[in-house]
Amino acid sequence: MIDIARLAGVSPMTVSRAFKADGTVSEAAQAAVMKAAEELGYVFDSTASALRSQRSDFVAVTIPSINNANFADTLRGLSEGLRARGLQILLGYTDYDVLAEETLIAQLLRRRPEAMVVTGGTHTDRARALLDKAAIPVVEIWDLPARPIGHVVGFSNAAAMGAVVDHLVAEGRRRIAFIGGDAARDTRGTDRRRGFVAAMDRHGLDATRLIDAGPPPISMAEGAAAMADLLARLPDTDAVVCVSDLSAFGALTECQRQGIAVPDRVAVAGFGDYEIAAICVPPLTTINPFPHRIGQEAAALILQALDGKLTAATTMRITPELRVRTSSDGA
Amino acid sequence: MIDIARLAGVSPMTVSRAFKADGTVSEAAQAAVMKAAEELGYVFDSTASALRSQRSDFVAVTIPSINNANFADTLRGLSEGLRARGLQILLGYTDYDVLAEETLIAQLLRRRPEAMVVTGGTHTDRARALLDKAAIPVVEIWDLPARPIGHVVGFSNAAAMGAVVDHLVAEGRRRIAFIGGDAARDTRGTDRRRGFVAAMDRHGLDATRLIDAGPPPISMAEGAAAMADLLARLPDTDAVVCVSDLSAFGALTECQRQGIAVPDRVAVAGFGDYEIAAICVPPLTTINPFPHRIGQEAAALILQALDGKLTAATTMRITPELRVRTSSDGA
DNA sequence: TCTAGTGGCGGGATCGTTACCATCACGCCC
DNA sequence: GGGCGTGATGGTAACGATCCCGCCACTAGA
């Protein structure tokens, strides 16, 4: 920067101001600085800037998996909302493991992010303590935590899943099964299963057709295997609710392979409104939790919080919508 | 850090060394430092460390889209390989736009990454210049650039697509169409189309059944629309090659909706070996380019380069494999 | 003519860590 | 006993920006 100052015939301070583009530099000086910078191939050093100004322009984000279209949509929403303010996302993924999340959070905080977005509402005590001490805006997304750390943009996975059950019951289904994951790790999956059981109980129906499809994320193939298991063990099942559209699609294909008519003999429903749900044959009934909007709202909350316009912890409830499609048409 | 030094009864230098964990600190001092740090809730500041040591421990990565299972697999491979050395990924996505890539690269370089991974081999001149001047290891992936910037881990998209055509021809297909994207933006898509045309020419077949499905990334729905278009305009088509498995699946569903038998009347093939290709009914013939391995190899190259063990620019060719499945069985 | 206000710019200290030396205790060997 | 290698530790000056303050020229109003 000193070199540029020399070449442009100004002080380093003016160069710094020129790069901040805050308009307090004369046009002549601005142009001279930019010309000199271009000539010397200067690349601004955010590291030094971050140290001195104590502003990293990072927002740290943790998601369970990088390979998930729903979380990718949320990330896009976040990134779009933050880009306008020059904030960059620092991403990490947890593999659906709260211990990995703890390590990840510790590592991300070393970079001094301006804010932190974490997926889910379940964390280790140490992770909570770290976030607390960091004294930056924290947003939990994709869930409604019992004990929020800071702000929240989410929805009740249990309630959303309950709406699917209500719909299936209204369509005349009674022997409804649930295909989901290992209870210990995927807390959102567990919430959905809880929502399923609660809704079945509410309708006075048997809620014991629970198929464990293994640890998250549950693949299409695992959904198919679970469906095969279900059809073998409980062949009179007339509807299946899956923890996500991907396993639901796997289940659907298993029905196709076995020549079982969907929805005539078995209705199938998923969760997430992935692209595949709308286009597969028959299209899948599912829940749209508006992942992109979750990201946008989280970004908006962060911007407000950084402006000091958000005094109290805010919870923004997203209302997921049921998408009724052919896969669950009345029997 | 000074506070910790005081509390632990050592010098700041010893605290620094204790956190680097390079083993030159006595066990007693190490323990004292860690205890003091825990007590004070100290969080190491990577920003200052990066500035002074000129090591950011960042590896910058650009991908076209964050919502793509293939690139996600590559990212996982990268991240796994780099994590062992304490390197963190700084991610950006370009939306399949070389101009956006240029801006992104400029922004990422401000963070002083130790190395840079860029997807694809087509870049603006300014982007090339920036990467050149940065004087860090550069790895281009998912392509075999005509004029590599540095290292390469990739494959020929054209040749891989040619292999699909060869297979279809061997199965007796002759009137083969290609469903792909806008030529201007998605260079890998364009390469695949080129490979399609070249292979058709090689077999003396008509290579004019080219359906443009719009700008990348091409969705399942766009694949379906393109298939509908194709079936309306060229109903005698007996095979379709799609730029990716997602559009191929869309095309497959369109056939199902129109009651057109796959593979009996039309064979369908995709690209990428996404999970859906193996499980849909019928399963899709496709090309597996080993996205996870691309990430692993790129990480390995970076580690070698950072160790100074890589003197010359290295190109690592990945050999994609044809996955023959029912969707392309002989007519 | 003088004072106060304003816009543009410069100088020096500094953000929190680490590179680079210097120091010191200790043990070993000739 | 002196020299010297080794392992642990400390002191000081940076890394490259920016914060804070001050300076100067110029204008406007009294």
Image (cartoon, coloured by chain):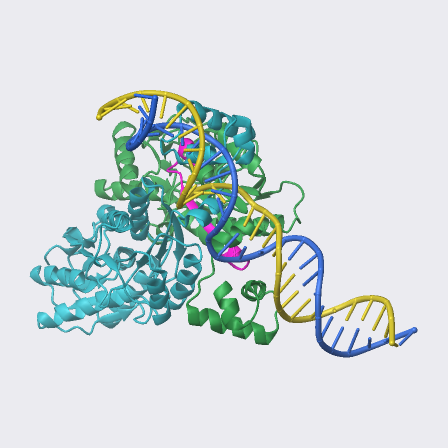
Chain colours: A cyan, B green, C blue, D yellow
Out of B23 and B117, give the one closest to the viewer.
B23
Q: Residue at x 42, y 62 (%)?
A: A106
Q: Relative to the observer, which residue lies in front, A30 or B236?
A: A30
Residue A127 vertical placement versus A300 (above, below):
below
Q: Residue at x 52, y 31 (%)?
A: A5
Q: Is residue B293 visible?
A: no
On screen, residue B261 versus residue B308, left or right, reads left
Q: Is residue B215 magenta?
A: no
Point out residue A256 in the picture as x, y percentages from the top left corner.
26, 55
Q: Residue A240: percent from the left, percent from the top?
A: 20, 63
Nearest the viewer among A52 and A190 is: A52
Would residue B139 be found to the left or right of residue C3 on screen? right
Q: Residue at x 57, y 42 (%)?
A: B136
Magenta part of the chain: B77-103
Residue A13, image x and y in percent?
Answer: 47, 36
Q: Quadrant of the C terminus of chain A?
A: bottom left
Examine the rendered structure and indicate whether residue A24 appears above or below residue B292: above
Q: Can you see residue A253?
A: yes
Residue A204 appears left or right of A269: left
Residue B96: say if magenta. yes
| Whole-percent x, y for residue B145 in the image | 54, 34
